[in-house]
Amino acid sequence: MELLIIDAQGGGIGKQLAASVKKARPDLLVTAVGTNSAATAAMLRAGADRGATGENAVLAGCRRADVIAGPLGIVIADALLGEITPAMALAVGQSRAKRILIPVNHCDNIVVGVEDLNMGRLIAEAVERILKNAEEKG
């Protein structure tokens, strides 16, 4: 199974996802794609197997991934302070991969009906879903 983690800005969410997934399942292939080099570098330092940066890396990664994980903003054009381009959001949304999105209520995108949990708890739940999906795929 190939996991694609997409993040922007400083890559803090992606960093936590990469570290937690690799700790639980070192055998999973984790590809980190940042919208900028700082985000990519943070995820690579956290243990991602490989990394790339920019719009085309998101587009290509979405075609290969079995699971895509990241903050909710990766499916909203111009989210994450404008770092998510319309093409990136479209690629994530149209991918055949399962999407595991972390509901971060920032940048004017508020998710109603979702419990306001701390980031640690959100990351733990996302990792649990990623690992469950990995087990289902074999």
Image: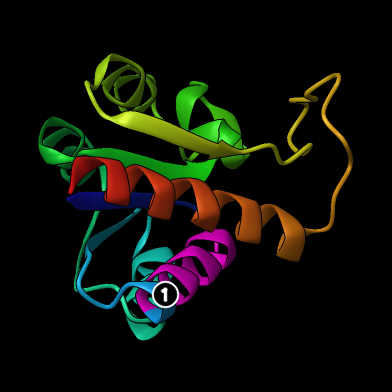
Query: Measured along the vertical axis of the image, is residue 67 above or below residue 22?
Result: above
**Quarter-of-image position of residue 29:** bottom left
| Left or right of 128 on screen, residue 23 | left
Q: Is residue 13 magenta?
A: yes
Q: Is residue 14 magenta?
A: yes
Residue at coordinates 78% horizontally, 27% vertically from top-left? 108
Residue 122 on image: x %, y %: 70, 53
**Quarter-of-image position of residue 99:** top left
Kindly identify the amino acid type of the residue bearing the numbered disc 1.
Ala
Nearer to the camera, 133 or 31? 133
| Left or right of 87 on screen, residue 56 | left
Query: Measured along the vertical axis of the image, is residue 124 above or below residue 3?
Result: below
Residue at coordinates 33% horizontally, 81% vertically from top-left? 47
**Quarter-of-image position of residue 106:** top right
Residue at coordinates 22% horizontally, 21% vertically from top-left? 96
| Left or right of 11 on screen, residue 88 | left
* Residue, far bottom: 45
Q: Secondary structure at mark 1?
A: helix
Nearer to the camera, 71 or 37? 71
| Left or right of 60 on screen, residue 18 | right
Nearer to the camera, 119 or 58? 119
Dominant SS of magenta comes to helix
Residue at coordinates 12% horizontally, 31% vertically from top-left? 63
Residue 75 on image: x %, y %: 47, 25
Q: How is the image coloured?
A: rainbow
- Segment colored magenta: 9-22
For the question of whether residue 82 can be seen, the reply is no
Residue 117 on image: x %, y %: 85, 49
Residue 93 on image: x %, y %: 36, 18
Residue to which mark 1 is pinned: 24
For the question of whether residue 11 can be seen, the reply is yes
